[in-house]
Image (cartoon, helix red, strand yellow):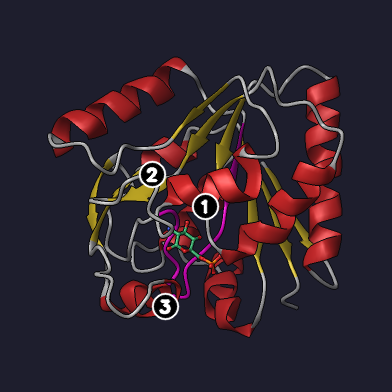
Amino acid sequence: AFFEVIHVADQQEAAIIVQEKLEKDLQADTLHVLGLATGSTMIPIYKRLAESSLDFSEVTAFNLDEYIGLEPTNINSYAYFMQEHLFGHKPFKETNIPNGKALDLEAECARYENQLNEHPLDIQFLGVGENGHIAFNEPGTSFDSVTHVANLTDSTLGVNSQYFGDKEEIPNTAFTMGIASIMKAKKIILLAFGEKKRPAIEALLGDTITKEWPITILKKHPHVTIITDIK
Ligand code: GLP
């Protein structure tokens, strides 16, 4: 298996490496479906991609997750985040994000998972939560999970609440790709910066695979690149 850890000084250096990796795969014609993540970790990466000359017009994008109940026009939705940081600057062939306003939650999960099965992910970007969650697969989530409705933990709600205005209600459920959906990606690029992510990265680099640290499942993936400033 390919398991590479790239230490970088900062997020700018990480963004350059990500750009180079995507460029290589686009040139080799091996990047048709790209899995995208949200969160502050991704902002400098998307800024760099947005300003680059990379052409994503033949690439289909899939996002990991979306809050349930939020419209794409809500500034806290991941649809809005993607528009602001990437899609508004770079045309893609097609973009997919779970529909936060879907009324039939089970049907929306099945629809999304079907779309993923029809468009196998070539590369999936991942960030990581402080508690080791990937997408919204919180500690305890089955490694066999596919796209599902996740109940967010107090830890995740606490961390994410900084992005929500006072009056606004923070959704406590979200659609998320499951761990099995993510593990099907051919390559995974995980990004983690700052001391708050150290426990998660140490779990990933340790010996144990445990549901209590969802990120540790990546040890079983055939092709993972970890880009981090944590030494
Ligand atoms: C959210 C997202 C994750 C993301 C995590 C870390 O919970 N669902 O996909 O990895 O936040 O966010 P940040 O990059 O802001 O630390």
> Which residue is under mark 2?
72
Residue type for callout 1: Phe
Across and down, in percent, residue 186 comes to 60, 31
Residue type for callout 3: Val
Across and down, in percent, residue 82 comes to 54, 46
Magenta residues, start to end: 123-135
Q: Secondary structure at mark 1?
A: helix
User: What residue is shown at x 74% (from left), y 52% (from top)?
Assistant: 47
User: What residue is shown at x 42% (from left), y 37% (from top)?
Assistant: 97
Give the quadrant of residue 25. Answer: top right
User: Gap in Å between the C-alphas at discs 3 and 2?
Assistant: 21 Å
Earlier in the chain: of badge 2 and badge 1, it is: 2
Question: In the picture, which quadrant includes the N terminus?
Answer: top right
Prevailing secondary structure class for the magenta stretch in the rendered image: loop
Label 3 crowd bin: few (<14), some (14–19), many (20+), radius 10 Å = few
- Is the residue marked 3 within 8 Å of ligand 1, measured from its CB? yes
- In this rendering, position of residue 186 left or right of residue 181: right
- 216 or 171: nearer the eye? 171
User: What residue is shown at x 70% (from left), y 50% (from top)?
Assistant: 46
Queried whether the magenta region covers residue 129, the answer comes back as yes
- 123 or 231: nearer the eye? 123
Give the quadrant of residue 201. Answer: bottom right
- In this rendering, position of residue 145 left or right of residue 56: left
Across and down, in percent, residue 73 comes to 40, 47
> Which residue is under mark 3?
159
In contact (CB < 8 Å): disc 3 and disc 2: no
User: Gap in Å between the C-alphas at discs 2 and 1?
Assistant: 9 Å
Instruction: Say which mark, if any, is on residue 81.
Output: 1
User: What residue is shown at x 28% (from left), y 71% (from top)?
Assistant: 168
Earlier in the chain: of badge 3 and badge 2, it is: 2
- Is the residue marked 2 within 8 Å of ligand 1, measured from its CB? no
